[in-house]
Image (cartoon, grey):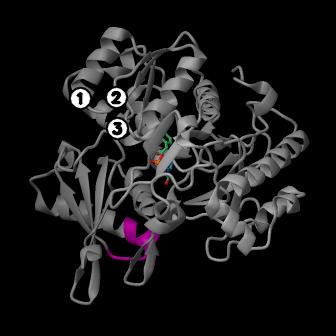
Amino acid sequence: MPIWNAEYESMPREALAALQLRRLQATVEWVYERVPFYREALDASGVRPKDIRSLDDVRRLPMTDKTALRDTYPYGMFAVPLEEVVRVHSSSGTTGKPIVVGYTKGDLNTWSELTARIASAAGVTSKDRVQMAFLYGMFTGGWGMHYGIERVGATVFPAGAGNTERQLMMMQDFGTTVLVCTPSYALYIAEVAEKAGIDIRSLPLRVGLFGGEPSGEGMREEIEKRLGILATDNYGLSEVMGPGVSGECEYQCGLHMAEDHFLFEVVNPETGEPVAEGEEGELIITTLTKEAFPVLRYRTHDLTVLDTSPCACGRTAARMRKVRARTDDMLIIRGVNVFPSQIEDVLFKIEGIEPHYLIIIDRAGAMDDIEVQIEVAEEIFSDVMAEMVAFTKSVSERIYSVIGLHAKVRLVEPGTIERTAGKAKRVLDRRRSD
Ligand code: DLL
């Protein structure tokens, strides 16, 4: 499959490192001159822009956490005056003030280039008809992907998220070949189609560009099977740009990272020290070309593993493993560390379980209780009590074998768990309200 920008995406790694160093030096200088937060942080750590002489020197730079972005709300981290900012987005935080990010014309140009790359990596060309079912608005997903896909030359239908019946009508009438949305919304579309008797697999749809939330291989298989498509995973975050930071190629063996525009580190989240390649750690990102909203060593809290081995597609850009967990979504239940993705992986392997679940943590007295609500196919619901009990018990045992905790498993009817057109909510931690 052709590579959108072979000159950069397949650059020899030595030349890439030299380019990264030049851009890193320019970025440090840029923020030192223009962002008081960074000038103070660099002064406090005794580092001047001219001290950055090698890529390893990135470790001398201060890390940036979400709190710095919150404390400077709304424009305090902007490195250019507002008249040079042509677009503003904000993060999807659920409480308090959002994080506000800005883009210059140059930033939008880079952003479109990077989302064009990931669309192209999934096989999207000017012949495609692309249904954009990400939310438009302050969320970076809609607009970010929109411009990249236009740049590829495909025909875009900016449907936005939601109104699933209309999505299906468009898909049938317009001959959509590519669907862009969160993976959980893709499954919901499949479900609504099945109920309406529409066989999406017989439609021209052939590719899905998904992202914005974690999804495992089980979820991918389910989506690919039910929609009859090739599904790629795409990662990004508002604080460094939005979608386009990394994305899978057709080989689906990790997400190629846009290393000519970002410097990636994977560190031990507790010590901040780099982990060896192949080991899991927290992804830290420094922007290398951002003008309006550059960040130094941004702590993503996302856990991943780096892979610089060659890929069959010919891109030399390193890959990151699918992000399945964040340092801050780890649940501590009765002293045991549990990631929701561990439970999801168990559920997706069990025949008869629908891909919709909710993990509820509660505290009864001094003890934490964990309940996993799962939807099951109609045929699993049985009049024979003993069969239901046995099924529930076997699910609970499989969860126990992975997380080492007894979870109460509650089977619920299909359609009971809330669906969303955006990012799915999988955990309800009732302990947090006390
Ligand atoms: O979700 C940007 C985006 C939109 C990426 C559309 C891809 C497609 P935020 O709303 O700021 O930005 O949320 C960023 O979402 O730190 C991850 O925890 C999570 N996330 C995003 N993409 C993935 C993914 C957008 N493919 C936060 N896999 C990030 C796992 C993801 N987690």
What element does badge 2 sit on? loop
Q: Is residue 354 left or right of residue 72?
A: left
What residue is shown with label 3?
Answer: 185
Q: Earlier in the sequence, mark 1 or mark 3?
A: 1
Determine the main secondary structure of the stretch shown in magenta.
helix
Q: Is residue 423 above or below residue 124?
A: below
Ligand 1 closer than 8 Å to the CB at disc 2? no
Q: Note whether residue 273 is visible.
A: no
Residues at badges 3 and 2 in contact (C-beta under 8 Å)? Answer: no
Q: Give yes or no for residue 400 being in the magenta stretch.
A: yes
Spatial CA distance of label 1 from label 3 is: 11 Å
> Residues in magenta?
398-406
Q: Is residue 430 above or below residue 122?
A: below
Q: Note whether residue 135 is visible.
A: yes
What residue is shown with label 1?
Answer: 163
Residue 238: percent from left, percent from top: 51, 47
The three-letter amino acid code for the residue at tag 1 is: Asn
User: Image point 57% across, 43% down: which residue?
Assistant: 81
What element does badge 3 sit on? helix
